[in-house]
Image: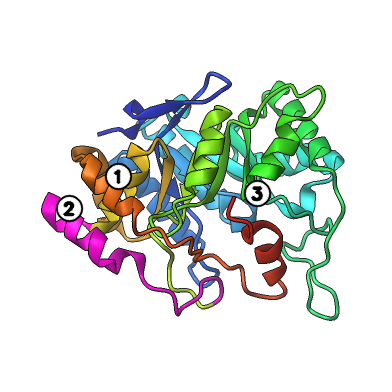
Amino acid sequence: METQCQRVKLNDGHFIPILGFGTYTPEEVPKSEALEVTRFAIEVGFRHIDSAHAYRNEEQVGQAIRSKIADGTVKREDIFYTSKLWSTSLQPELVQSALEKSLKSLQLDYVDLYLIHTPVPLKPGEEILPTGEDGKLILDSVDLRHTWEALEKCKDAGLTKSIGVSNFNHKQLEKILNKPGLKYKPVCNQVECHPYLNQSKLLEFCKSHDIVLVAYGALGAQRSSKWVNPNYPILLEDPVLCAIAKKHKQTPALVALRYQIQRGVVVLAKSYNKKRIRENIQVFDFELTPEDMETIDGINRNMRYYEFLPRGMRIFKSLILGRQF
């Protein structure tokens, strides 16, 4: 089954598949695996592929997409590809060249969606995390409204079909929405979202402005001590999710994904395990009851897995992740 038949209309008229395949992996995972699993995800039916410059795997992900186009599995227009503008390229004059760099790595003519990855500007340069001698991140100063104008120009130039943001709270979104001369609204806001952090207030705000919420970390998080607090409970072992999964004869992961879909949230399923990738596509084969949805709402803890811990990245937590809404 192709997930493209389950799509959400964006405020610019384009459509985004409601289930996406997330390609981020910890540094210790070989980049070659991104090629293999992305290719496999397309084979089993994923049509929405999410990556970013900061993931450092766009060359492999692009190769996977192009190989499935070449063998006739899909056409380019069947694939919805998302890339992201990293924090070191938020100066307006750097935006288009950053997108062109991603396109060169991907060997694609355009991306379907280009996001501001985070609202925290970092010192421009080749380093993903520029740090000083004291080990702290070197911040930059940028008016994100000017960055947004540069994204609008990228859309007009045909380099991206749609533009949006990621890791923005409602105040940061309002700055863009209230910008004089706004040409295009953000079509989406991609944030950490799962039953332990259901983002209900932010979801309500986004819906009121015709902005789609896209969920990453929807299955909790890989237990990487570098990025994730290892002391937090494992989402997919939650007894409530497990009980609902048992009732429907599904996995807790599928219940967590289905929960988002029934809320109108576009959800990214990230796995490098082929068995689980194949299982995740089965999210359209069942429905949760209103009682199930209400029960899952009840396990919200406002708990973030992604703390961005290494090398001074704690500042990201305080600047963009510390505000729930």
Residue type pointed to by label 2 = Gln
Residue type pointed to by label 1 = Arg
Compared to 154, does 218 lie above or below?
A: below
The image position of residue 115, as x and y in percent, is: 64, 41
Q: CA distance from mark 3 to mark 2?
A: 33 Å
Query: Could you tell me which residue is drawn at 44 percent across and 51 percent down?
Result: 198
Q: Earlier in the sequence, mark 2 or mark 1?
A: 2
The image position of residue 111, as x and y in percent, is: 59, 34
Q: Within 10 angstroms of label 3, few (less than 14), some, or many (20 or more) residues?
A: many
* Quadrant of the rendered image containing residue 69: top left
Query: Could you tell me which residue is drawn at 21 percent across and 39 percent down?
Result: 287
The image position of residue 210, as x and y in percent, is: 55, 27
Compared to 39, does 321 lie above or below?
A: below
Residue with the most extreme top position: 13
| Element under disc 1 | helix
Q: Within 10 angstroms of label 1, few (less than 14), some, or many (20 or more) residues?
A: many
Identify the disc placed on residue 198.
Answer: none
The residue beneath circle 1 is 258
Query: Could you tell me which residue is drawn at 79 percent across and 30 percent down?
Result: 179
For the record, the magenta segment spans 226-251
* Quadrant of the rendered image containing residue 45: top left
Q: Label 1 near label 2: C-beta < 8 Å?
A: yes
The residue beneath circle 2 is 250
The N terminus lies in which quarter of the figure? top left
The image position of residue 168, as x and y in percent, is: 64, 47
| Element under disc 2 | loop
* Number of numbered callouts drawn: 3
In front of the other: label 1 or label 3? 1
The residue beneath circle 3 is 117
